[in-house]
C-alpha cells in the first residue's frame, strides 16, 4: 500500500499548495465563516441539507470539539493563496476493504465560484490522498441538477457511476481512480 495507512493519513497536519489554493488544517477562527455557510439557504440547497437552526455559540462549541476530536473525517480549510478562507473539503465514509472513501467540497464564498478554485482544490486534495495513503478510489455524490458541480468534478477525473435517490433528492454517484488521477496529472 503506497504512502501511509489511512489512520496515519488522518492524523496529518499538512498544508497543501495548489495553483490557486492552500489546503490547511481547520482552526477555531474558521468557525464564523463555516457557520455563515451552514445557515445559508442556497448553499444548503446545493448540499441537499437544511440550514442550521442552532445559534453560533452552540455551533462554535461543537466545532471546537470536532477540532479536538476529529473522528474518522479528514477536513481541511480552503484558503486562497492570499490566505482568504473560502471553503472546506473533506474525506469520509472510509471503506477500508476496498481502499475507497468519499470526498466532499464546499466553496462557501460566492465571489470565488466559477473561477477554478473548486477544481484546483479537488485536484490538489486528490493528488495528495492518492500519493500519501492507500486509497485506490474516491467517490462523491452530487445533486443531479447541479450541472456546474458535475462539470467541475468531470474536469477532475470523476466519472458518473450511477444515481441514487436519498431524502427526496436524486444524486449522481461519481468516482475517480488512483491510477487515472496520478497518470493524468490531475
Image: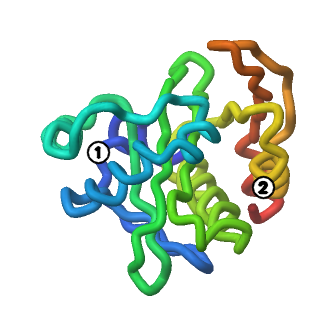
Give residue 119's quadrant in the image.
bottom right
Which residue has dot 2 on it?
152
From the top left corner, tell me how far across and down residue 116 is, in percent. 71, 71
Does 24 sit above or below residue 21? Answer: above
Q: Secondary structure at mark 1?
A: helix
Foreground residue among 151 and 125: 151
User: Who's the residue at 59% across and 73% down the image?
Assistant: 111
Which residue has dot 1 on it?
11
Give residue 70's quadrant in the image.
top left
User: Who's the residue at 56% across and 48% down the image?
Assistant: 105
Left or right: where does residue 26 sit relative to residue 144?
left
Does 138 sit above or below residue 155? Answer: above
Q: Earlier in the sequence, mark 1 or mark 2?
A: 1
Foreground residue among 45 and 47: 45
From the top left corner, tell me how far across and down residue 2 is, in percent. 55, 44
User: Who's the residue at 58% across and 65% down the image?
Assistant: 110
From the top left corner, tell me how far across and down residue 41 is, in percent. 53, 42
Amino acid at each position: 500500500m503506497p504512502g501511509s495507512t489511512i489512520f496515519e493519513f488522518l492524523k496529518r497536519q499538512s498544508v497543501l499548495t495548489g495553483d490557486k489554493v492552500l489546503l490547511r488544517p481547520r482552526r477555531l477562527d474558521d468557525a464564523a465563516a463555516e457557520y455563515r455557510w451552514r445557515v445559508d439557504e442556497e448553499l444548503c440547497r446545493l448540499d441537499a441539507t437544511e440550514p442550521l437552526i442552532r445559534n453560533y455559540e452552540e455551533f462554535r462549541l461543537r466545532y471546537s470539539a470536532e477540532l479536538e476530536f476529529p473522528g474518522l473525517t479528514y477536513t481541511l480549510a480552503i484558503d486562497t493563496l492570499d490566505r482568504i478562507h473560502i471553503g472546506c473539503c473533506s474525506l469520509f465514509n472510509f471503506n477500508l476493504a476496498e481502499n475507497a472513501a468519499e470526498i466532499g467540497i464546499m466553496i462557501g464564498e460566492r465571489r470565488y465560484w466559477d473561477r477554478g478554485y473548486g477544481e484546483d482544490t479537488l485536484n490538489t486534495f486528490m493528488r495528495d490522498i492518492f500519493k500519501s495513503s492507500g486509497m485506490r478510489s474516491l467517490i462523491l455524490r452530487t445533486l443531479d441538477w447541479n450541472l456546474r458541480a458535475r462539470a467541475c468534478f468531470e474536469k477532475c477525473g470523476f466519472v458518473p457511476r450511477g444515481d441514487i435517490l436519498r431524502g427526496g433528492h436524486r444524486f449522481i454517484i461519481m468516482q475517480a481512480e488512483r491510477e487515472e488521477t496520478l497518470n493524468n496529472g490531475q
